[in-house]
């Protein structure tokens, strides 16, 4: 269920246009004073509950609105950024380098296809206002199930005014069949921050087919 009337209007308008990535030419608009007030990066990153040693994947970082905060929470860990637009990665990289984060991975590619990382690489994955733009959302979540470790966290930040905003119910419908369980959800009119955990058991055989053999997955049907 979409939380506001305006959200529904935006979604309907967007539905007529189709799915496409937020243009990198408008990246500056993602970092505006109003957003800094209502979507504080520190608050969203708090929900991941990082110890500082983890290997974290951020999908669709854009120009790095959340990435600097993420990197600063990983003093002995590692951050990898993955975005379909190399131009966005270049902008995020500039922001991270200025903030002194030089050991970040940058990979360009399609999140709705198998992710180019070995199975079980990551302790956590973070997606802020991205999943609605991915054409094959199920494939994306199945790929995330592969690259996350069992017990790994998958955190979505979905916010007001994003025409692609997914509700908590929609995220559950997407993630649970791929072997994730809802772990924590902070909901409000303005934003939802939703955390799942990757289980070792998948509820759909389709998801299992797509999981790598090295994963300890395990129940069919
Ligand atoms: C609305 S922007 C959000 C950027 C950033 N997370 C933020 O909150 O400021 C969406 C980002 O997801 C990326 N993206 C969209 N579709 C994608 C896909 N299929 N695969 C990988 N990245 C994608 C876009 O290039 C863009 O950087």
Image (spheres, rainbow, N blue to C red):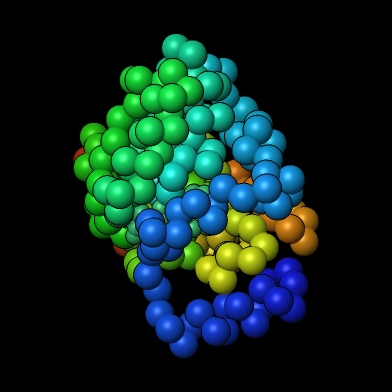
Coordinates of residue 62 in the picture (x, y in percent) = 43, 48
Q: In the figure, is residue 51 to the left or right of 139?
A: right
Q: Quadrant location of ligand 1?
A: bottom left
Hey, which residue is sitting farthest right in the picture?
Answer: 188
Q: Is residue 117 visible?
A: yes
Q: In the figure, is residue 169 to the left or right of 218?
A: right
Hey, which residue is sitting farthest bottom in the picture?
Answer: 16
Coordinates of residue 208 in the picture (x, y in percent) = 32, 53
Hey, which residue is sitting farthest top in the picture?
Answer: 76
Q: Residue at x 60, y 44 (%)?
A: 195
User: 52 or 148: nearer the eye?
Assistant: 52
User: 87 or 60: nearer the eye?
Assistant: 87
Does 67 appear above or below 7? above
Coordinates of residue 59 in the picture (x, y in percent) = 40, 46
User: 129 or 123: nearer the eye?
Assistant: 129
Does 205 appear above or below 149? below
Coordinates of residue 3 in the picture (x, y in percent) = 73, 69
Does 167 appear above or below 64? below
Quadrant where the image shows the N terminus: bottom right
Quadrant where the image shows the C terminus: bottom left
Q: In the figure, is residue 160 to the left or right of 85?
A: right
Q: Is residue 150 visible?
A: no
Does 110 appear above or below 45? below
Q: Residue at x 50, y 30 (%)?
A: 68
Residue 183 figure quarter: top right
User: 85 or 26: nearer the eye?
Assistant: 26
Q: How many marks?
A: 0
Q: Residue at x 65, y 33 (%)?
A: 42
Q: Residue at x 65, y 82 (%)?
A: 9
């Amino acid at each position: 269920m979409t939380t506001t009337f305006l959200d529904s209007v935006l979604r309907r308008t967007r539905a007529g246009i189709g799915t496409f990535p937020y243009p990198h030419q408008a990246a500056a608009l993602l970092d505006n004073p109003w957003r800094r007030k209502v979507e504080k990066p520190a608050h969203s990153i708090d929900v991941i509950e990082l110890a500082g040693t983890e290997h974290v994947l951020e999908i669709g970082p854009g120009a790095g609105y959340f990435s600097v905060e993420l990197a600063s929470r990983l003093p002995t860990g590692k951050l990898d950024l993955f975005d379909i637009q190399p131009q966005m990665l270049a902008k995020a990289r500039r922001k991270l380098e200025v903030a002194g984060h030089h050991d970040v991975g940058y990979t360009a590619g399609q999140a709705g296809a198998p992710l180019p990382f070995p199975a079980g690489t990551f302790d956590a994955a973070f997606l802020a206002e991205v999943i609605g733009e991915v054409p094959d959302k199920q494939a994306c979540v199945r790929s995330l199930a592969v690259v996350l470790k069992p017990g790994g966290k998958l955190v979505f930040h979905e916010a007001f005014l994003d025409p692609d905003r997914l509700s908590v119910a929609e995220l559950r419908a997407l993630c649970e069949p791929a072997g994730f369980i809802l772990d924590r959800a902070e909901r409000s009119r303005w934003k939802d921050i939703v955390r799942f955990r990757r289980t070792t058991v998948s509820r759909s055989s389709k998801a299992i087919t797509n999981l790598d053999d090295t994963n300890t997955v395990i129940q069919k049907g």
